[in-house]
Image: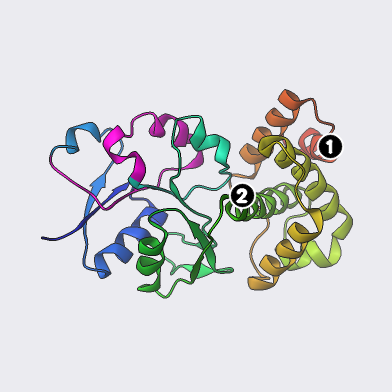
Amino acid sequence: MIKTVVVVGLGELGSVFARGFLKLGYSVVPVNRGDSMQKLVGLVKPEAVVIAVGEADIHSLLTEVPDEWKQKVVLIQNELLPRDWRAHSFDRPTVISVWFEKKKGMDSKVVIPSPVFGPKASLVSEALATLGLPSFIVETEEALEFELVLKNLYILTTNIAGLEVGGNVAELAQHHTELMNNVAEDVLKIQDWLTNHQQDRVKLMAGLKKAFEGDPQHQSMGRSAPIRLQRALGYALEAGLVVNHLRAIADKHLN
């Protein structure tokens, strides 16, 4: 019998995962916007259910995952932390911190290998390997949290600082070091609050440097930068955090 994987959301990133599973010999059942996952439960018994929608849609989508599929879910979103899936009673999903970029009309571009955690980690890693996309398996929830915070640090620092200076990550690190460090510290204050403990600044900043070296020409400011900054400020307001550097950038670029 042919094994099956469900992919919810077949955008650029979801399509990469779908292609990897197809190359492994799995059939792929797509779930598009407006489709009912519940109606598929009696028809499909998937090995994994890849949730490939954007950050803005993840919380509403997780409320729709059938109970029968919860142990098979694979999450791939940016700005993801354990509090996000725990809010929807997901105990131990498979989670990958995606460190490759896929845009329309271009091949996937790797920054650094992508860490994967959870019951379907080996399957996800094997699927990515068929496409030449490197990954590695992390064994503990603590290690996963670090990897997710590192990706959040990278995304938020580069996007928010990029609103101010543009350019690529090499230029940000070399010519705007003070700005980068100030934004990173504000970002990490928010990550501390979201994870309910203080994160290791030294280890995370070393990881950030390694990610910059993985793709020095990566553009700092993505199109989602203003939304990411607004979301970060929302968390800071809720937590009562002082994030003066983020607020100064917002005052200049969000008004």
Say which quadrant the C terminus sits in.
Answer: top right
Residue 169 shows in the view: yes
Q: Are marks 2 and 1 in contact (CB under 8 Å)?
A: no
Q: Secondary structure at mark 2?
A: helix
Residue highlighted by disc 2? 145
Comparing 173 with 68, the one in front is 68
Label 1: how many residues lie within 10 Å, few (<14), some (14-19) or many (20+)? few
Q: Looking at the image, tell me whether mark 2 or mark 1 is earlier in sequence order.
A: 2
Q: Which three-letter amino acid code belongs to the residue tagged 2?
A: Glu
**Outermost residue, front side:** 140
Residue at figure coordinates x 68%, y 71% from the top left: 216
Residue at figure coordinates x 64%, y 40% from the top left: 228
| 54 drawn magenta | yes
Q: Which residues are magenta?
A: 43-71
**What's the mark number on residue 130?**
none
Looking at the image, residue 147 sits to the left or right of residue 61; the answer is: right
Comparing 204 with 122, the one in front is 122
Q: Which three-letter amino acid code belongs to the residue tagged 1?
A: Ala
**What's the mark number on residue 248?**
1
Residue at figure coordinates x 71%, y 24% from the top left: 238
